[in-house]
Image (tube, rainbow, N blue to C red):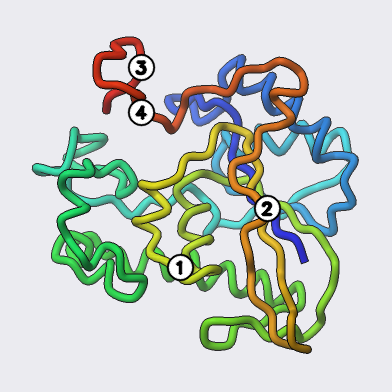
């Protein structure tokens, strides 16, 4: 089975929609995704993901099921001393300053990263387990049942399913599928708007499957039509680059 995790287009966060550029990106994305043989489409409840998906769904003549747990990951942390405040004295956990989070060895541990005082205070374990539980339930519907750290291929298949969602929650899903701390994914990777991350099953022994990332953050559909990727989700390449986002 193939799982396509698709980030929304360039966001208009204030209105939970897309910018003009984001709409162009979503249109180009639809040229890539709509012709594919997609078994089922799923989408986050948030407007920017719904809008992005709408171009593909209209072109393909399909509908998508909304998954509440696929919304952008919204378990926030206290921002004091960690980085600039995003909202109400809190901060999203994937924008922590490197000089802070890299000092804590637990953040690299897939089983203990949410046991730090900061994460416990935020209720982080509950937040990620909502996503992990939702993802496992969805995969079981499509023939793969979680057992320990692998999946039982109850009904193995070559289907492709697509989820239109967000960067933060994508990393939470990937952390569960490949067994790593999402802190490493959140801070070590970036996926541009409308990028496609492809995860595939491997069943090297009958009925025992694991998931492997085949590609992450692919934006070849933008380059094909000469559309430069949006900067959303990135920070300045060099501190003196005043025109690029610092925080």
Element on which disc 2 rests: strand
- Judged left or right of residue 242, residue 63 is right
> Pointers 3 and 4 in contact (CB under 8 A)?
yes
Could you say which disc has been placed on residue 130 in the image? Answer: 1
- Other residues around mark 3 within 10 Å, as few (<14) / some (14–19) / many (≥20): some
In three-dimensional space, the C-alpha distance between marks 2 and 3, rounded to whole angstroms, equals 29 Å
Which of the marked residues, 2 or 3, is nearer the chain's N terminus?
2
Query: How many other residues sit within 10 Å of disc 2, few (<14), some (14-19) or many (≥20)?
Result: some
Quadrant where the C terminus is found in the figure: top left
Label 3 or label 4, whichever comes before in sequence order: 4
Q: Nearer the viewer, residue 79 or 102?
A: 102
| Mark 3 lies on residue | 244
Helix or strand or loop: what does disc 3 sit on? Answer: loop
| Residue 145 horizontal/vertical position (percent) | 66, 82
Q: Position of residue 34 (x, y in %)?
A: 85, 39
Disc 2 to disc 1, how far (Cα)? 22 Å
């Amino acid at each position: 089975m193939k799982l396509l995790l698709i980030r929304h287009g360039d966001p208009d966060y204030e209105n939970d929609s897309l910018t003009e550029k984001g709409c162009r990106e979503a249109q180009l994305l639809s040229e890539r995704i709509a012709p594919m043989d997609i078994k089922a489409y799923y989408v986050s409840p948030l407007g920017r993901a719904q809008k992005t998906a709408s171009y593909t769904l209209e072109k393909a003549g399909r509908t998508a099921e909304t998954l509440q747990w696929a919304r952008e990951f919204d378990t926030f942390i206290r921002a004091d001393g960690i980085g600039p405040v995003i909202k109400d004295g809190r901060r999203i956990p994937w924008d922590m300053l490197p000089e802070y989070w890299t000092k804590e060895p637990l953040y690299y541990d897939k089983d203990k990263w949410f046991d730090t005082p900061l994460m416990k205070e935020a209720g982080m374990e509950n937040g990620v387990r909502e996503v992990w539980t939702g993802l496992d339930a969805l995969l079981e519907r499509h023939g793969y049942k979680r057992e320990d750290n692998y999946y039982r291929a109850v009904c193995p298949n070559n289907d492709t399913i697509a989820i239109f969602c967000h960067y933060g929650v994508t990393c939470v899903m990937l952390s569960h599928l490949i067994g790593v701390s999402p802190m490493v994914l959140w801070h070590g990777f970036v996926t541009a708007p409308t990028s496609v991350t492809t995860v595939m099953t491997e069943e090297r022994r009958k009925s025992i499957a694991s998931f492997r990332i085949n590609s992450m953050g692919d934006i070849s559909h933008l380059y094909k039509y000469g559309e430069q990727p949006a900067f959303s989700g990135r920070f300045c390449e060099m501190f003196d680059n005043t025109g690029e986002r610092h925080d």
